[in-house]
Image (cartoon, helix red, strand yellow):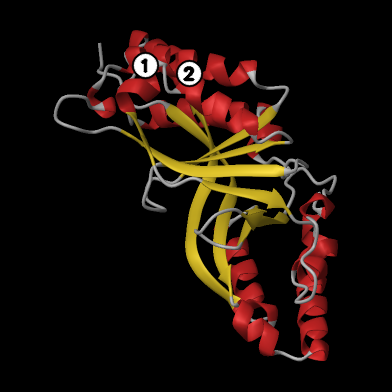
Amino acid sequence: MPETPPFPLTLDGASLLHQMFRFDWPAWRRLDALGRDRAIAEAASLLAPLEKTTSEARPSQSAVFAQLGHKGDLMLVHFRDSIEMLAQIQRDLVRTEFGSFLHPTHSYLSIVELGLYESSSKLYSQLASEGIEPYSEVWEQRVQDTVARQSAAMASRLYPAIPDTKYLCFYPMDKRRGEHVNWYSAPMPDRARMMQDHGLIGRRFAGTVKQIISGSIGLDDWEWGVDLYADNPGVFKQLIYEMRFDEASALYGLFGAFYVGVRLPVSQLGSWLSVGEAPATHGFK
């Protein structure tokens, strides 16, 4: 029997860019009122059309979040059909007058990813039983057919709209590759079982939190990015806490910095940027 690959197939979807900025408040205050109004209007002209949900199969959207804590002031999230389109919005933003007040503190590039552990195991077993050599022309065609079929069925999850919620929690993560515990050397059936158990916890929170997983191996410093969207920030703590107890996280999970923001509609950007009385936070979406 031909040996089967140790990795599951994955489906790739929308390209994601997270941008975290510190806002240059001293320079903003030095700008006269007319200049501030001009900068806000230019930013709104760029971003307002992009925050709307469209009926397209592959929505191109951007969302602004007022970031909490010392890691920055604003977080912008962009969902696009390609990395080239992300490069365009990154360039368009930095060319605005508003962009000159944004100092990057962090960014993250990734692609929406769905793992196919169960489908991969079935396909690999079927191909092996037929004596088809991995990576042969026939093998590659069968794999491509499976990926195409699954991608069509999962299109809404691969190209999601940015959830219309009040809060976002984003963090990157790795699977451990240490001397004693190495995710990538664990047998594929064991990894599939652990990921199924891990997913069961997430599904229990399906009504209160929207989770979008994106792959970043070869694209950024970590292996995955995780976006959690909810109207109650307390569920971030509860969900992540419970997941820490499952085997996939307890033994293999490594987590980067967490970034939390409150949705800031572009229509309220001027209020947030006011140099007079501070805007009430309940005014944010």
Name the spot of residue 29 as percent of width and height, x first: 69, 84
Give the number of the disc on residue 247: 1
Q: Is residue 114 left or right of residue 189?
A: right
Tag 1: Cα neighbours inside 10 Å, few (<14), some, or many (≥20)?
some
Name the spot of residue 214 as percent of width and height, x first: 52, 41
Residue pictured at 41% horizontal, 53% vertical: 219
Helix or strand or loop: what does disc 1 sit on?
A: helix
* Residue 134 in sight: no
Give, as a three-letter code, the residue at label 2. His
Given residues 168 and 107, the one toward you in this image is: 168
- The residue furthest top is 129
Location of residue 94 by image quarter: bottom right
Give, as a three-letter code, the residue at label 1. Glu
Q: Are marks 2 and 1 in contact (CB under 8 Å)?
A: yes
6 up-or-down from 41: above or below: above
Given residues 190 and 24, the one toward you in this image is: 24
Helix or strand or loop: what does disc 2 sit on?
A: helix
Name the spot of residue 41 as percent of width and height, x first: 83, 77
Given residues 22 and 51, the one toward you in this image is: 22
Residue pictured at 41% horizontal, 39% vertical: 173
Nearer the N terminus, badge 2 or badge 1?
2
Q: Is residue 79 left or right of residue 110?
A: right
Q: Which residue is mark 2?
A: 198
Residue pictured at 26% horizontal, 20% vertical: 186
